[in-house]
Amino acid sequence: MRRAILVPVAALALTLAAQPFAAQAPAAKPAAKPAAKPAADPVARGKYLVVFGGCSDCHTPKVLLPNGIGLDSSRLLSGHPATAPVAPPPVGMLSPQGWIAATNVHLTAWVGPWGVTFAANLTPDATGLGSWTDSVFIRAMRTGKHMGVGRDILPPMPWTSMASLTDEDLKAIFAFLKSLKPVNNVVPAAMTPSLR
């Protein structure tokens, strides 16, 4: 008699014990969204790529907010502010045992073993990309050279990642940059390690 009672009780206990695990089983994955079609408007596509790529992280000056820093929308993608001072890094900070790079409060100036670099003005002003064409922009992103033939594009600019984009995507990015409000801002030239 005991055995006849224990078997159903044990079966019920196993069923109840299994229920929480069944409830915790991973849910089925939602159906994948179809691939988005490229925007018919190259400026809209370019804006999407610029925002997704985080270009403003380095190329837009920042403003202090109550909870940290934010983008200065009046100087969108205008590069390192020409009037912003750049303090020398603390002695010994950049070393194989220390840090490889440091940045200023705007995140527009970077110092590392390559020297000091300043985020470029990407607006269509004469002090930025005003004289550039989409083919010059593409060549610069493919070669890592300023205007595709000049000085090296230095860290932290991820031009090697940009080089993997299609010509159409790079043209879209350039179309968006050309649509921006021009900001007159002469960005300082990069400084070699010996000049910092």
Image (tube, rainbow, N blue to C red):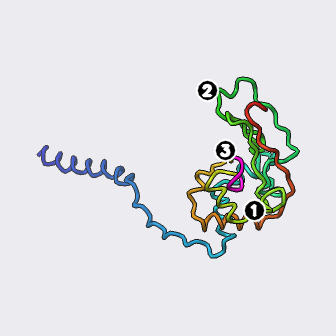
Q: Which mark is residue 156?
A: 3
The amino acid type found where label 3 is placed reads Pro
In the rendered image, residue 14, in percent from the top left (x then y), is placed at: 25, 48
State yes or no: discs 3 and 1 in contact (Cβ < 8 Å): no
In the rendered image, residue 146, in percent from the top left (x then y), is placed at: 71, 52
> What residue appears at the point 64 percent right and 33 percent down from the top-left corner?
100
Whether residue 68 is visible here, answered yes or no, is no
Residue 82 vs residue 152, the one in the foreground: 152
State yes or no: discs 2 and 1 in contact (Cβ < 8 Å): no
**Mark 3 neighbour class, 10 Å CA radius: few under 14, some 14 to 19, many 20 or more:** some
Q: Earlier in the sequence, mark 3 or mark 2?
A: 2
In the rendered image, residue 176, in percent from the top left (x then y), is placed at: 72, 66
- Asked if 63 appears above or below 32 in the picture, the reply is above
* Residue where numbered disc 2 is placed: 96
- Asked if 110 appears above or below 145 in the picture, the reply is above
Q: CA distance from mark 2 to mark 1?
A: 38 Å
Q: CA distance from mark 3 to mark 1?
A: 22 Å
